[in-house]
Each structure stands twice: as C-alpha cells, then as structure tokens.
Amino acid sequence: MDATGRTRGVDQRGRMRVHDHAGQRRRPSGEPPALPHELGRSGKFLLLMLLYFVLVLTGFLVFPSLEGVFERLDHGRQVRITDLRSPGLTRVMLAVNGLTSTWSIRLLRWGVIIGLVVFRRWRHLFVFLGAIILTEIVAYNASTVIARSRPLGIEILTGWQGYSMPSRPLAGLAVSAVGATYALIVAGRPRSIAKWVIGIVLVILVFARVYLGVDHTTDAVMGAIFGIAVGVAMFRWFAPNDLFPVSYRRGKAAHLDIGGRRGEAIVSAIRDQLGLSVLDVKPVGLEASGGSTPLRIKIDATEHEPERFLFAKLYAKSHVRADRWYKLGRTILYGALEDEKPFQSVRRFVEYEDYTLRLLRELGVPVPRAYGIVEITPEREYLIVMEFFEGAVEIGEADIDDGVIDQGLALVRRMWDEGLAHRDVKPANLMVRDGELKVIDVFFVQVRPSPWRQAVDLANMMLVLALRSDAERVYAHALTYFSEDEIAEAFAAARGVASPTQLRNNLKQDGRDLLTEFRRMAPAREQVSIQRWSLRRVLLTVAVAFAAFFAVGLVVSNWNAFV
Amino acid sequence: MRWRRRLGTAAVVAIILSTLVSCSSRAGDASEANCPVEDGELFVLMAQSVPSATLLPCIEALPAGWTYGGSDVGSGTSTFWLDSDRGGIHAVEVALTSSCRIAGGVDVTNSTSEGGVRVYLREFTLHPFSANEYFVFPGGCVTYRFRFDGDAEPTLALEAEEAVTFGLRTVLVQEIEQDFGLTLCGAGAPPCVDGD
C-alpha cells in the first residue's frame, strides 16, 4: 500500500496498475452476505406445517395409541365450526365445496394443459403433469397407509371418496392451481396476486370442508399444504423462472429478477468486493443467453477511469442444474465426444469462466478483461464481471473486411496451437469494433479438447465469416493459417448439430449452401462420425429411456386424474 | 456438498421405489376387509359410507385360489372385490349400498337366514357365469356381482359366498365410543351434529 492508501498490483498484461480501494471493504466474519439466503415467510410457514404433519404422521403410524388424542383434538376443533351450521350457510358451503369436485379440478387441469400446448410450453407441461401425478399417487397411498376414517360424531353433508387424510380433493386442487400459476402466469406482481388468491380460496375451502364434516381440520390443511408444496417444489426445481420464464412477449423475459433486494445486493456487492460504484444495472442480450443472466452495469467515474459500462453474468444454482441436464443430453446424443463432467456448484461455474477469460487474455485472444467474481449469496449466486465492448456490433451485423477474416482465422489457429477449443463459435459470440474482432462468452472453452471439437471450431468460424462475405474469399484466407487437410477435416467434422443453433438458423436464412461450397473447395475427406459409443452412454441412454417409459406409464395409469 | 447430492439421489430413489411399491399395492391390503368388523379401519369407512346399514360385509376366510383384490369406498357405496385363479380378476364384487333394485329378482332366502336378511338372485347366466345376488337387510343391501371368466365353474360362486359374511354395525359403534369417546353416526348410534 502506498502513501495515498492505494495498493499496487499487476494487470493482465503484466503492467503495474493501481487498485482504487475507495469503496472496497472486506466482509468481516459474522456479517451476512450481500443477499443472504433465507426462507421467506411463506417458505417458513410451509416448512413448519410440513414438520407438523411429519410429526402427526409419525405419531399416527408409530404410536397408534395417539390416534385417539388426535381424533378428539380434531373433533374439538371441528365442532366449533360445525356449531355454526345453518341452512343458508350450508348451501353456501356446498357451493364453495364444488370447487373441489372432480369436474372442477379436471376443468382446471385441462385448461392449463390446453394453454400450455397452445403456447408450446412443453417443459412446463411435463412438470405440471408430473406434479399432478406425484400428488395423486402420494396422497392416495398416504391415505391408505394412514387409513383415517371421515370425521366421527358429525353428520357428513357432502359426498366423499376414500380415506380422509390427507384430503385428496384439496391436494389435487392445490397442486393444479399452483401449477397453473407457475406455468401460465408471469412472474412478479401477477403471480404474487395469483398466489394470494389461491391461498385465500384454499383457506375458504378448508373451512367449507370442515364445516360440511367431510374432512377433519388436519386432513384438509395437510392436503392443501401438500399440494402447494409439490407444485412449488416441482416448478422451482424443474422449471425455475430464471431459466424458463413465463412470458407472453416476443423473446425471453428477464432471467433472474434483478430488481428489489437482488438489485440492491448487486450494487452493494460490486461496491464492497470490487470497489466500483454502480450507477445502473440493466439486463442485456437475453435472447442469446440461456445459461446465465447477462447484465450491463454502468460504473461511476473514478480517479483513474471515466464513467463506463461493464458486462456481468449472474449465475445461480438453477444454471448449474440446467448445465447438468444440458450435458446429460449432449452425452446421450453424441457420446464420448461430449463426455464431460458437469459442474457441481455455482462457485465452480464462475471460477471456470474467470479462469478461461484470464487464460485467453494472457494468450492474446481478444476477450473482455476480467474484473473478478462478486459473491451475491454464498454457494448460490455469483456475478462474474468483465469489460463491456462498448460500440462493438455482433459480427452478423458488421462489415467484414479481409482484416476481420484474418483475425477470425488466426484466433482459431491460436487456440489450436494452445490446445484449446471455444466450442461455441457463433455470430452472437463474435463482436467487431473499429475493424477488430472480439470474442465473448468463453464459458464453453475447453482445455485439451477432442480434435473433433477443434475442427468444428474452425468450420464454424469459416461459416460465420462467409455469412458476411463469401466462401471463396474465406477459404483463400484460411489457407494462410491452415493446411488443406485441416480445412477438409473441419468440414468433415462439422455436421448439423455440431454447429450452434444460431449459426444453423443464420445459414438457413442466408440461402447459400456455404457448407457444400466449402466442402467442394476442400480436398475430399470422409465425414468424421460424431457419434461415439461408450458403456456410460449406453447406460445413460437406457436409464433415460426407462425413466421416460416409467413417466409415460405413470401418466397412462393415472389418466383418471385428468379424464 | 457431496452428502447433499447423495441425499438428493436417495430421495429420488425412495420416491421411485415408493411409487413402484405404491402402484403394486393399489390392489389393497390383503387383510383390510377381514372379519371381525371391529378390527378394521375399512369397516369404519364403510359404516360412514352407508350410515343406515345395520350390517357390514367382511371376509371370513378365503378359500384356496381366491385372493383379496382391493376396495373402493365412497359416500353412498362401499365395494371390495375378490380375484380367483379360476374365475379371473375381479371375479366377485361385493357392494354395500343403502338399497338395491331387486325388481324381477328371485327370492332365494333359505330358512337359516338370520337377522332379517332376505336374498334375491337376478341377471343369472351360466356361460360364462354371471349373476347378481342381493342380501337385503334393515338400512342396507349387499350385492355380490359374480363375473367369471369363460370356463370357470359356476360352483365357484359357492366358495365366494362362504368366504364373505356380515358383521354387526352396532359392534363397531361401541368400539368407536370406547376407543375415542366419539359417535359413529348412523344406525345403532345416538344422533350426531346434523345439518340444521
């Protein structure tokens, strides 16, 4: 530390630089992080209720003598409500209870199913069906294991089916309503309102069913809570809003909500951990991003740098899960070539991207300068902050001259020579500013990749460059950096799915058959098989096929829940 | 973190296994409909299903080749069924209702019939064997629906008839009163909180 209170460091190019520690501070032991992970009030309530029911269940099953205690307790509570019985109120309660009828629930379920089919929201549809089936199966089997009769000592005023605990109609309605909310209603205020409405309706229904003597209080509450818990857990786990947002506008909606507490946490965490004063945070480029929430952050001027923008990617646990599913899919589709271990934590995610950024920059690849990792919630959410290429345009919209073509090809050559592969070469990841090519999104970079992967990088780069120029020109330049055999290998390896979706779409829109044009120019070479079989792939494929078969079997065997 | 993954995996496996187990156990607990009626939770539910019924059907002893199939109890109707290695799946269905339509049925009540139970036979066919037998008693009716597979002998019906018998609702009412201090509303019990 020098006399002015600043420390000296070494930047990525090896030059001495000065860290401005104006706002930077270390979080002392015991102080909560920027965004502490804590259960909301509803989460705590749900957890408490679940705990209560686990205790009740254990009591019922392990200590049968407790059954009488619970019966009398529930009866006492119920009588207080049934004492209110009057002809008028009974008619109202019977009408209200109609919401838990088989037909009401089926109508709701089919409404959601049709809605999801119309909006082609397949993932939400499968999660919705899964939640319903899980609820029906568990509730049915729990009720037969507990085998609790309908309320004693009270005349039952409406129809019922089977044992009473948990209340299956309430569980079925709750999971369907919560599923409808998570699958069809936009996150934020509309969904929040819907949750309140569901909560109020369920409370009224619990009262109605207890009043009508068809459920004990515990049965009704347990059914409702169970249905809610399954619905919420299934959607949060398998279709988290930050990855699979519900939106009725074109393009993707914001991934992780960066307003409210999270927005404040981002600002304070960047200030504390990087010493940068944030003026504004905005989501950016969401259409091309699925694995993280990309942000453009406006930073206040410091003594050493003017006001500027930085780019950041917010990673959460849901992204780790998505990565796991993505890699599982790739392994099944292609086998050994994509056989790689998924990341086990968000921390590893950001650490890896930070590493690849610094590695590539050290090797002279024009990637954004890494500013560091910012902890938002330990082990749950991290932000990786890097340089924002202000004024740069995506290569798909830029003018391509010979210089840019050479830079693109040299970049692949450099990565080949260093034993690296980018693995996601597409227009959205290549920017041009003042005739200089820049590479962004280096998350998929792999060290010592398969030769096939490197070959595909070259083919994809040549295709991207040819989209804005022509195949002959790009091929001629490529011969400066690669041998004819290497180019032939690239186009023998690049087939269909080897190219990113955006690139494939752009090629389709372009109309020219650039792939064939390149193949015609390059020496003939047998196509590289992208399918590699291994025991792991076979086992995974069999396991997934079994799971799919099992899931279909469950839907078929529980079809009466829908029709 | 590793233990969390293991816990997660264990939870998934447990769910799958319990689902598999639960799917296979849908057939019902083999002993749930066994006599005496005061020993089974199913009979409390049955008694609530048809509160007016003074008798409840139960299984005395299953002859060789017969197995308990499962039950379906709801307001107004309680059913359980038996499977037979010769008569087929769902060979006999035993249903308790508050009344039955016995018009056109043949009265086959024998002299040893107890408790005012009258027996009627209707919709009788021999090949394949199919018949409805009605046991009508105060406040209720139990129907045996025989639906045997093609070659099954009609005499199998006698085995099923012997397997199923009736228990008194009043015994169950006393049992509930004794265990919980509560009333099993309906026949043989004091009045409950009503709908007025």
Image: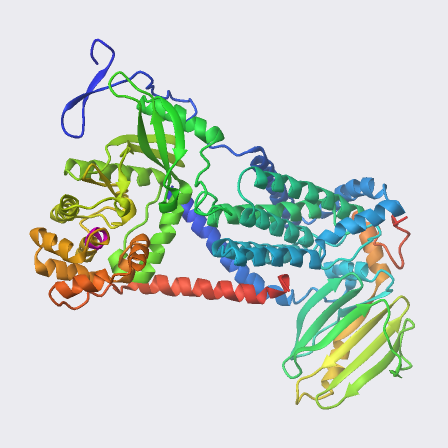
> If the image is split into quadrants, where does the N terminus of chain A sit?
top left
| Residue B98 location (% of width, % of height) | 85, 67
Q: Report whether A189 appears left or right of A411.
A: right
Question: Foreground: A125 or A220?
Answer: A125
Task: Please tell me whether residue B22 belongs to the stretch shown in magenta.
Answer: no
| Residue B31 location (% of width, % of height) | 68, 66
Give me the residue at 37% from left, 38% from top: A284
Give me the residue at 43% from left, 65% from top: A546
Question: Foreground: A15 or A288?
Answer: A288
Numbered circles on residues, count: 0
Question: Foreground: A522 or A440?
Answer: A522
| Residue A66 location (% of width, % of height) | 70, 45
Give me the residue at 56% from left, 67% from top: A556
In the image, residue A218 sits, relative to residue A267, either above or below, namely: below
Task: Please tell me whether residue A462 belongs to the stretch shown in magenta.
Answer: yes
Q: Report whether B41 appears left or right of A20.
A: right
> If the image is split into quadrants, where does the C terminus of chain A sit?
bottom right
Is any part of residue A35 visible from this angle?
no
Q: Report whether A278 appears left or right of B149.
A: left
Q: Residue furthest top?
A: A3
Quarter of image, res A271 = top left
Is any part of residue B50 visible from this angle?
yes
| Residue A379 location (% of width, % of height) | 38, 36
What colour scheme does the image use?
rainbow
Type of secondary structure dominating the magenta stretch: helix
Quarter of image, res B175 = bottom right
Question: Foreground: A250 or A426?
Answer: A250
The segment highlighted magenta reads A460-465
